[in-house]
Amino acid sequence: MERKEAITKLQLLVGKELHALAKEYGVTIYKNNKVNKGWAGHVFERFLGLPINSAQSPNFGSWELKSIPLKTLKNGNLSFKETMAITMIDSINVCQKEFKDSHLLAKLTKAVVVSRTVGHSVDEASYIHSIVQFDLRGRLYDDVKKDYDLVRDTLLDNARGFNALTGKMGKYIQPRTKGSGHGSTSRAFYARPLFLKQFIKL
C-alpha cells in the first residue's frame, strides 16, 4: 500500500475510539498481564489490511507509521504527551552523511503520523485526532538541518563526541538517551512538541 492511499484510508478513522477498533480487529491491549505497548499501531496496521510487523517501527517501504499521544490539560486544551522518537543515532552514519542524505530526513519525509487523545491510563477512551505527514520546506527545513548539523558537528569534534549529545540540544529535533534513561549509552533523534505543532493542529 502506497503512502497516499494509506493516508486517505486512515483519515476515515478520525473521531473513532481506539479500544472499540482494537476489539473489532482482534488486537489485545494486554499481553501476559502487561500493556501491549504497540497495540495502537497494530490496530492501524490491521485496519489498513497490513500484516503485523515485528519491527519496532512498522515500515511499509515508501512510508512509515508513527503514533503520537495527546493529553488533555486541566483547562481543556490538548497538548503533546511526549516527544516523538524518529530514529536511532548511528554516529558513523551521521558523520558520513550531510542532512540532505541523512537517515533523519528520510525518516521524517516517510512518516505518516496518527495522533490520538489518551487518558491517565491505557483503559481510558482514546480517540483518533488527526492524520498528518511531515512536509519540510523553507525555514522549517533550514532549522531542522541546523539541529542535525549541531549533532553532526558534535560527533565530528574529538573534544566532544557521542557522549556530549544531550536532550538540551536542538530547536525542533533533539538528540537524547534512548531506552532506560540513566546509564543508557544509546541516543536517538526525537521530534520536540514545537516541531509536531507545525503539522498537528491542537
Image: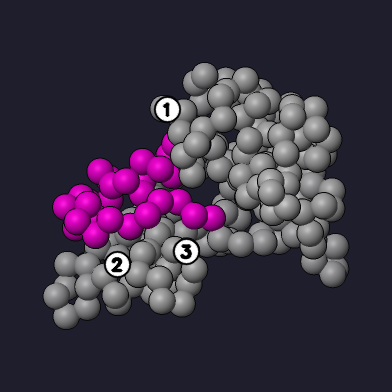
Location of residue 26 in the rendering, given as x and y in whole percent from the top left corner? 74, 29
Q: How crowded is mark 2: few (under 14 residues within 10 Å), some or many (20 or more)?
A: some
Of tags 1 and 2, the one toward the viewer is 1
Q: Over which residues does the magenta segment extend?
A: 84-110
The residue indicated by pointer 1 is 62
Please tell me which residue is depicted at 79% across the width and 47% down the height of the picture. 126
- State the residue lying farthest toward the bottom: 159
Q: What residue type is labelled 3?
A: Gly
Name which of mark 1 and mark 2 comes first in the sequence. Answer: 1
Q: Which mark is residue 179?
A: 3
Left or right of residue 164: residue 23: right
Location of residue 113 in the rendering, given as x and y in whole percent from the top left corner? 58, 41
Left or right of residue 101: residue 19: right
Q: Main secondary structure of the magenta part?
A: helix
Instruction: Answer whether residue 105 is magenta in the image.
Output: yes
Q: What residue type is labelled 1?
A: Ser
Q: Which mark is residue 150?
A: 2
- Residue 8 in which image quadrant: top right
Instruction: Identify the secondary structure beneath mark 3.
Output: loop
The answer to whether residue 64 shows anywhere in this view is no
Q: What residue type is labelled 2?
A: Leu
